[in-house]
Structure formats: C-alpha cells, structure tokens
Image: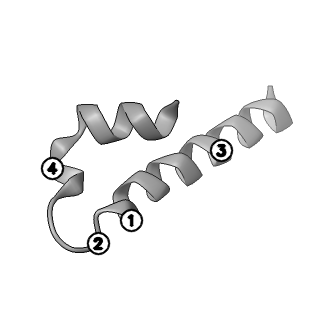
C-alpha cells in the first residue's frame, strides 16, 4: 500500500534510472518511524 501511494503521489521520485531507490527509502523510513513509536511510545 505504501509503495503504491509513494509511486503515485511523488512522481519526481520516479525520474531517472534508479526509480525504486526513493520508494524503498520512504518504506524504510516509515518502518523506522513505527519501530521508534512503539519503542518510545
């Protein structure tokens, strides 16, 4: 679900030959935020 949202809402991240790096970065950032939220929340 996050993959589809990032692919459609952030079109600038899909330019160039390494188009999946931005999407993977957003997914990793989201996972880190959730882990920190559970650890410190």
Residue under numbered circle 4: 12
Gap in angstroms between the C-alphas marked 4 and 1: 12 Å
State if disc 1 and disc 4 touch (CB < 8 Å). no
Q: Secondary structure at mark 3?
A: helix
Label 1 and label 2: CA atoms lie apart by 6 Å
Q: Which label's residue is closer to the chain start, 4 or 1?
A: 4
Q: Earlier in the sequence, mark 3 or mark 1?
A: 1
Apparent side of residue 16 relative to residue 36 in the rendered image (left or right): left
**Which residue is outermost to the bottom?**
17
Label 3 close to label 2 by CB (< 8 Å): no
Crowding at dot 4, Cα within 10 Å, few <14 / some 14-19 / many 20+, comes out as few
Tell me residue 19's x, y (percent). 28, 63
Q: Which residue is mark 2?
A: 18
Residue 14: x and y in percent read: 22, 55
Where is residue 24? Give x, y as percent: 48, 57
* Mark 3 vs mark 4: in front: 4
> Which residue was labeled with disc 3?
31
Q: Are marks 3 and 1 in contact (CB under 8 Å)?
A: no
Label 1 secondary element? helix
Q: For marks 3 and 4, give the CA distance.
A: 22 Å
């Amino acid at each position: 679900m996050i993959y589809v949202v990032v692919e459609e809402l952030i079109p600038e991240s899909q330019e160039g030959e390494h188009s999946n790096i931005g999407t993977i970065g957003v997914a990793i950032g989201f996972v880190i935020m959730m882990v920190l939220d559970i650890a410190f929340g």
